[in-house]
Image (cartoon, coloured by chain):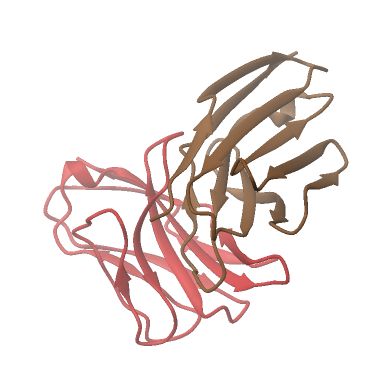
Amino acid sequence: EADIYQTPRYLVIGTGKKITLECSQTMGHDKMYWYQQDPGMELHLIHYSYGVNSTEKGDLSSESTVSRIRTEHFPLTLESARPSHTSQYLCASSEYTRSGNTIYFGEGSWLTVV
Amino acid sequence: GENVEQHPSTLSVQEGDSAVIKCTYSDSASNYFPWYKQELGKGPQLIIDIRSNVGEKKDQRIAVTLNKTAKHFSLHITETQPEDSAVYFCAASKGGSYIPTFGRGTSLIVHP
């Protein structure tokens, strides 16, 4: 099992502010992901990383950016938040087991932009 | 690319009944099928998974079945309890790919 830590869990910020959502994992997983999810709705992949210095955009276009300088850390940044960015953001990491590529999710960061 | 359809979107059952959630996939190369449970306010958690070389897998009240020919797999929950109420997601992925395709989710409500 992986331990994925996301901070902050809840954040309310004003339009135009810059914010960074932090994500850390302690299992040494190379693969990490960011998903965007509206309450009870589909999971949309917005960014992923195969390892240090690797970042890729996901299926859903996002104005956010990510970085992967350390294996355990995969922060997501919004340079200028807008109300349309209000959502839940889920960080995840994965390991390849005998079954397949198993993804482990964090508890999520709920972002509200007012 | 892979496409995963999940049905129903909402499922309401009485405590003690069984619940079945079905998913179909399009890519015959997919070979790994996990199921996730997401409780309110939390991230999805893996509850059971199955590989394509296995037809059925059980873990207490939860079972998953896979029909490779028809390209569909199902989650079965027996003797449902109120704490089973959550959103369930199926997913499919293939060897060498680290990006699974998720279904749209099923909201299961178990009435006491």
Compared to A54, does B61 lie above or below? Answer: above
Q: Residue at x 46, y 37 (%)?
A: B104
Chain appearing in red on the rendered image: A
Q: Is residue A26 left or right of residue A56?
A: right
Chain B rendered in what hue? brown
Q: In this view, does A57 lie to the left or right of A89?
A: left
List x then y, in percent, for residue B84: 71, 30
Q: Is residue B79 left or right of residue A109?
A: right
Q: Residue at x 79, y 40 (%)?
A: B63
List x then y, in percent, for residue B41: 52, 40
Image quarter where the N terminus of chain B lies is bottom left
Q: Residue at x 74, y 33 (%)?
A: B76
Compared to B51, does A11 lie above or below? Answer: above
Compared to B33, does B7 lie above or below? Answer: above
A36 or B75: nearer the viewer:
B75
Image quarter where the C terminus of chain B lies is top right
List x then y, in percent, for residue A107: 53, 52
